[in-house]
Structures are given as C-alpha cells and as structure tokens.
C-alpha cells in the first residue's frame, strides 16, 4: 500500500520533526508541570485526537479549502491563539489554588478536551499535513487517500510518542509542586506566561 523507499524517508523526516520542540510539546509540558503525569498523558492523548482530525480533514480535501481561504485560515488561526492565551491567563489566575488529585471524571474529561481543542484550533497543523504528507505518496500505487491517512496517523503517533517522553521526564517536577506552595505559584505563573507566549507565536509566527 505504501512505497517502501518513500516510507523510509518519511519515517526519518517524521522522527526528526517529532523530536523538534514545537507548540504541541510545550503545551503538553505545561500541562504536565501544572497537573502532574496523568494530566500530561491526557493532554498528549487529546493532541493525538486533535492531530487525527487534521489528518482526516487533509486526507479528504478539507484542508485544501482552508489553505485557499485567507478568511477561514485567519478565523481558525486567531481562535486557536485566543484559546491558548485564555489558558495562560487561567493558569495565572489560579496560581494560589491547591492542586487536587486528578481523580474526578469531570476533570479528566476537561483536560482531555483541552488537548483536543488546542490541536484542532491550530490551522498550521492542517497546512503542515497538506504540504508534508503528499511528498511521500506514490501515485502509481493508487488509493491516494488511504496512503495519506496511513502516513498521517503514523506522523501523529510519532508526535504523541515524543509528547509522552516529555511527560515522563517532566512529571517528577509535579511532585514538588504539590509539596511547595511557593514553587507551585511561581510555576503556574511561568507556565501561564509561556502559554500566552505560545498563543502569540501561533497568531503572529511565520507559517
């Protein structure tokens, strides 16, 4: 179904991109430092689902419409940026709130949804898949959409694997957050500022 030679090239390129720090990794890192390992994992799974949405959209041509419409791109782009800025302000506003154990289903679903929404509202992800994946599709093999979807799922899975590695290294820091109120306040402010900066990057950074 996939060209073996192109697949090797794709895996090399996708691995390099997955381990390169970007908005997704920084988002998962911030959530892990804020709420611990479980919250980080849920955020990573949320970004996986959000990335999969973009793969499906790109595979069926919806991203082509987004890329061709400056208005549509701007709306989704700035909606995603505002959402990240809102998350940042929320972290700063709740800097003095104690961290509870993430055992409630409502909180679990909320963290997961945030990961999904953050990734879905990033049009650069859609445009990335639209411009990157076609390079590794062999037209002679047919089943273009199937090839595209397979490559996209592999790419998203590799990104999520990198996110989970980040979670595993960052989670121990969360233990200190629960034992030191001062450290927790400072970290939440730092994470909030970072999230606001990330929103600004999404809004004003280069495509």
Image (spheres, grey):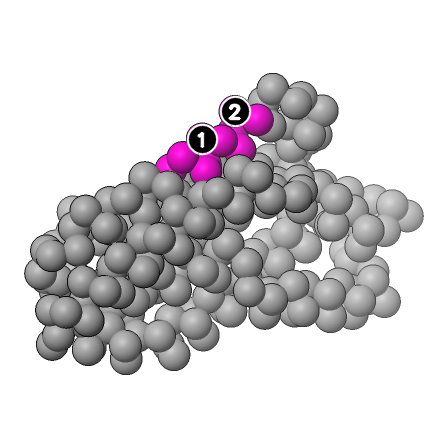
Give yes or no for residue 197 being in the magenta stretch.
no
Q: Quadrant of residue 86?
A: top left
Does any portion of residue 56 appear in the rendered image?
no
Left or right, residue 198 beside residue 108: right
Question: At which x and y percent is residue 177?
Answer: 19, 72
Magenta span of residues: 74-83
- The residue tagged 2 is 75
Which residue does the image show at 49% across and 31% down from the upper left?
A: 78
Does any portion of residue 70 appear in the rendered image?
yes
Which residue does the image show at 57% across and 39% down from the upper left?
A: 204
**Residue 52, above or below 30:** above
SS at circle 2? helix
Give yes or no for residue 80 being in the magenta stretch.
yes
- The residue tagged 1 is 79
Tell me, yes or no, whether the two marked residues, 2 and 1, touch with CB atoms within 8 Å: yes
The dot on residue 130 is none
SS majority, magenta: helix
For the view shown, which residue lies furthest in the right direction?
A: 140
Q: Nearer the viewer, residue 196 or 150?
A: 196
């Amino acid at each position: 179904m996939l060209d073996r030679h192109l697949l090797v090239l794709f895996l090399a390129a996708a691995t390099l991109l997955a381990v390169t720090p970007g908005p997704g990794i920084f988002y998962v890192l911030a959530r892990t430092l804020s709420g611990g390992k479980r919250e980080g994992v849920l955020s990573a799974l949320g970004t996986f689902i959000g990335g999969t949405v973009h793969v499906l959209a790109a595979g069926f041509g919806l991203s082509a419409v987004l890329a061709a419409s400056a208005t549509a791109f701007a709306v989704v782009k700035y909606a995603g940026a505002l959402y990240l800025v809102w998350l940042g302000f929320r972290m700063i506003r709740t800097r003095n709130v104690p961290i509870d154990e993430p055992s409630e289903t409502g909180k679990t679903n909320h963290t997961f949804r945030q990961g999904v929404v953050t990734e879905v509202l990033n049009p650069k992800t859609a445009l990335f898949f639209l411009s990157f994946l076609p390079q590794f599709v062999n037209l002679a093999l047919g089943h273009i959409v199937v090839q595209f979807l397979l490559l996209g799922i592999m790419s998203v899975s590799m990104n999520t694997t990198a996110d989970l590695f980040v979670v595993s290294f960052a989670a121990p820091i969360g233990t200190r957050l629960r034992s030191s109120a001062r450290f927790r306040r400072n970290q939440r402010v730092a994470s909030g500022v970072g999230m606001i900066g990330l929103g600004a990057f999404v809004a004003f950074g280069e495509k």
